[in-house]
Image (cartoon, helix red, strand yellow):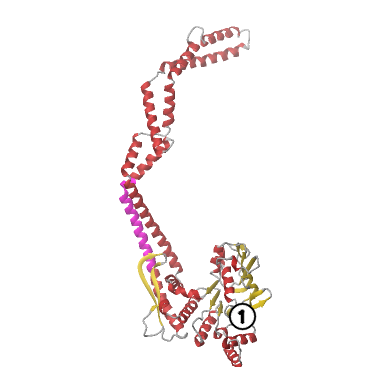
Amino acid sequence: MLKQLYIKNFTLIDELDIQLFPGFSVITGETGAGKSIILGALSLLLGQRADSKSIKTGCDRCIIEAHFDLSRYQLESLFADNDIDYDADDCIFRRELTAAGKSRSFINDTPVPLTVMKTVGQQLVDIHSQHQNLLLQEEDFQLNVVDIIAQDSQQLADYQEAFRSYQSARRAVAQMEENIAKAAENEDFMRFQYNELHEAQLEPGQQEELEQESETLSHMEDIKSALYTAEGILSGDEANVLERLREASRTIEGIKGVYADAAELAERISSCYIELKDIAGEVSRMSSHTEFDPKRLDAINDRLDTIYSLQKKHHVETVEELIALRDQLLKQLNRLDNSSEEIEALKQQEKAAKEKAGKKAAELTALRMKAAQKVEKEMKSRLVPLGIPNVRFAVEVTDTKQLAEKGSDKVAFLFSANTSTPMQPVAQIASGGEIARVMLSLKAMISGTVKLPTIIFDEIDTGVSGRVAEMMAKIMQEMGQTDRQVISITHLPQIAALGTHHYKVFKEETKEGTKSRMHLLNDDDRIQEIAQMLSGSDVTAAAVSNAKELLKR
């Protein structure tokens, strides 16, 4: 429930701080006095896009703030879902606009994106302006009304989950068919590429090994010469290293009997001799087995040329990348070969998903059919007292069998104000006053199911007067008696008289210019205001008497 509204520097309002109450309240005032300005400020607070032109001329910023009492509405989860601190007794919405075009939004002193403010605000306040009557032309609005009465939110959520699975299965089939079609167009080229890579017999690390062997064979003469020279130095003639080392060993061995330290040296020289002799043997073996093989070099270079050519052709740098490409081509070709089986499997999944979504849609249809009968009955009972005694109202629920986001149903509200005129879609046949009564009846009906804290009607009484206006006021009065706050902006004294609290909006000329004001009227002020609404600017005694009579009712 909206407890307090504070507006500063918004269009013609320099500062407004007004307290609001539970139940049914009314706001009156002459055309152009500023009632729409107050609604505009409240709409901004609830997430509407801002315009810096809304700031009062000469001011650098405007502030709009509202306090709500949410203690009776169990909205903790709404705030938790949006990660906002929850204060049931005093929930504060605040919006600031600057002349530079900047906007800031807060809920309970927590900065929030405008989208979050709008999401939360929609659960707190419903502003029914005249343009909302156009909703009667929209199928979605009519379907939503039936869903609210059917209380099928869980079934709708279950259906939408099944519908999304069905859509996903459809996309998978379409994507597979597209991929296969593209692959089929390039099948011959893909098979050529795969065969070329397959025949290359590529192996990981192969390129590095071949490049190393090519390098070795290309320098074979240098290698053999180096090995031959080393072999000669180590063991090739009488003065070779091994012979000299063995001689040194014998010499040291000869003195170890008289020189104790020589024993260790002799052992070390002997170890070096054994190791060097082994090295000499290895060098000799390598020298004897190392031969230049021009055929092998040609074969290796041909193999490398094949690898380099494939890498250049496929714009890769390693054999491993070529192997990955080969495997990918094989996978695509295998998929193409097995495409009929894979497509059939996906189509079976699509069929199962569609059948499941269809069953969920049928459950929704059954609930909506039942709710439609309830809507028809209640709307007739509400519209007859509102001055349409011969009203006929039907809710046509048509199962199209075509699955969509909200099921397979189309809903149409059919209306006729008399027995001689065939029923047609309400937006096409109803007059302005009849549409206003239909919308009020719908709001009253669904408000019993949706626990919305505050409902504001902006001139819902368009096109009606007299007793009908009084009946509309009584409906709004009843709506305000069930833990709900109802506020009506009206030009009709019959509606104004039934408000528990009465506010007046008026313009005031000051030295600073024209300003809009809003005051809560006391009993005497209410009599004068309603009398003026009855008789115009010249308030007569008869008008005062009529005003008092209306207030007594």
Callout 1: helix, strand or loop?
strand
Please report the bounds of the magenta region as a residue range. Answer: 334-362
Towards the viewer: 344 or 215: 215
Q: Residue at x 63, y 9 (%)?
A: 259
Q: Which amino acid does the dot numbered 1 rest on?
A: Lys
- Dividing the picture into quarters, in which one does residue 44 lie? bottom right
Main SS of residues in magenta: helix
Mark 1, Cα crowd under 10 Å, few <14 / some 14-19 / many 20+, is many
Q: Residue 293 colored magenta?
A: no
- Quarter of the N terminus within the rendering: bottom right
* Residue at the image point whose x is 65% and y is 84% from the top: 522
Figure quadrant of residue 484: bottom right
x then y, percent, for residue 18: 64, 75
Q: In this rendering, does residue 1 appear at all? A: no
Where is residue 542 drawn, in percent x and y?
A: 59, 93
Q: Note whether 448 is above or below 325 in the view shown.
A: below
Front position in the image: 505 or 269: 505
Image-quadrant location for residue 359: bottom left
Nearer the observer, 179 or 341: 179
Which residue is rendered at x = 62% and y = 74% of the image?
A: 3
Give coordinates of residue 21: x percent, y percent: 61, 77
- Looking at the image, residue 51 sits to the left or right of residue 151; the answer is right
**Whether residue 134 can be seen here:** yes
Relative image position of residue 17 (x, y in whole percent): 65, 74
In the rendered image, residue 351 lying in the magenta stretch gets the answer yes
Quadrant, the C terminus:
bottom right
Instruction: Name the residue beneath numbered marker 1.
Output: 504
Which residue in the rendered view is the most extreme toward the right? 511
